[in-house]
Amino acid sequence: MDFEQMKAKIAQGKGFIAALDQSGGSTPKALAGYGVGEDEYSGEDEMFARIHEMRCRIVESPAFTGDKVVGAILFEKTMEGCNEEGMPIPERLAGKGIVPFLKVDKGMHDEANGVQLMKDMPQLADQCARAKELGVFGTKMRSVVHEANQQGIADAVRQQMDFGLQILGHGLVPILEPEVSLKSATRGEAEAHLLASFQEQLERVPEGQQVMLKLTIPTEPNLYLPLVEHPRVLRVVALSGGYERDEACRELAKNTGMIASFSRALLEELRAHMDDEKFNNALETAIDEIYSASVAG
């Protein structure tokens, strides 16, 4: 797929985006969920090797195809890795009809004004150039909203757009992800502030270009419909945010035009000890459920 084919797939394709981008901080928890304890690897290199094995097993599964998975978000080490045949993972994904994305953020600062802003990304230009070289379509970066602090939320969305415009300038499509925590006591109000901030910041996107948004499934169904329908938004995707898969799918299905970009909800029943048949069947079940929720609206 070339860039325009990938863009059409993301804009119009039926299905969801798989999030396979756990970073150093979240990898031990992801491996534990997969049935690999910290006593089964030593040091960061072995840890990343084990998570790469898991991701390759997912990517190579016959259940993981572009028929229902329109895209996949990769951690940088995964983007740079290869499958057993030596094919770069982005190329392997594209060959299966799945659009590759790269997680580019470098973690977050401590909470201030009810939000966690992203740390600086001094290597962003180099990351974008390398991603383009490997056939990646877009990027993803995450910050978190904990409270309905209007100024904090405005700052988080502005920061996301600042980086997003840089990424657009490098020829990639950014996914902007200011996650509203499910644990927030003021979640509904925070979501309203987030909507207003995005409506303001989207005016900065150059004519003829688009960004993507990755948002927590809103408490009020279709709250984000104005963003789904915005001409400068290519697609709005939803994170699972700690929901179990059943609940995440049920809540997502209430929202017209939003599709899933799940991580934990996709992986929750996969285990390292499964034989290939059980692994592929479990993955197929998860994919079918998430696909159905993503096309329901």
Image (cartoon, rainbow, N blue to C red):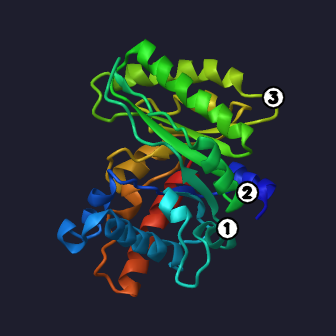
Q: Position of residue 257 (x, y in %)?
A: 61, 42
Q: Quadrant of the N terminus?
A: bottom right
Q: Nearer the viewer, residue 146 or 230?
A: 146
Residue denoted by label 1: 94
- Residue 130 can be seen, yes or no: yes
Residue density around tag 1, few if under 14, some if 14–19, many if 20 or more, within 10 Å = many
Tell me the SS state at disc 2.
Answer: helix
Residue 87 placement, left or right of 190: right
Q: Position of residue 260 (x, y in %)?
A: 51, 50
Residue denoted by label 2: 6
Amino acid identity at mark 2: Met
Q: Which mark is residue 53?
A: none
Check contact, mark 1 vs mark 3: CB within 8 A.
Answer: no
Tell me the SS state at disc 1.
Answer: helix
Amino acid identity at mark 1: Ala
Instruction: Decide: is 93 above or below 165.
Output: below
Instruction: Decide: is 71 above or below 221.
Output: below
Q: Residue at x 53, y 59 (%)?
A: 291
- C-alpha gap between disc 1 and disc 3: 28 Å
- Residue 257 can be seen, yes or no: no
- C-alpha gap between disc 2 and disc 3: 20 Å
Q: Residue at x 42, y 28 (%)?
A: 117
Residue density around tag 2, few if under 14, some if 14–19, many if 20 or more, within 10 Å = many
Residue denoted by label 3: 207
Question: In the rendered structure, which disc, 2 or 3, sits on the residue that comes first in sequence?
Answer: 2
Check contact, mark 1 vs mark 2: CB within 8 A.
Answer: yes
Instruction: Identify the image quadrant of residue 239.
Output: top left
Q: Position of residue 276 (x, y in %)?
A: 40, 85
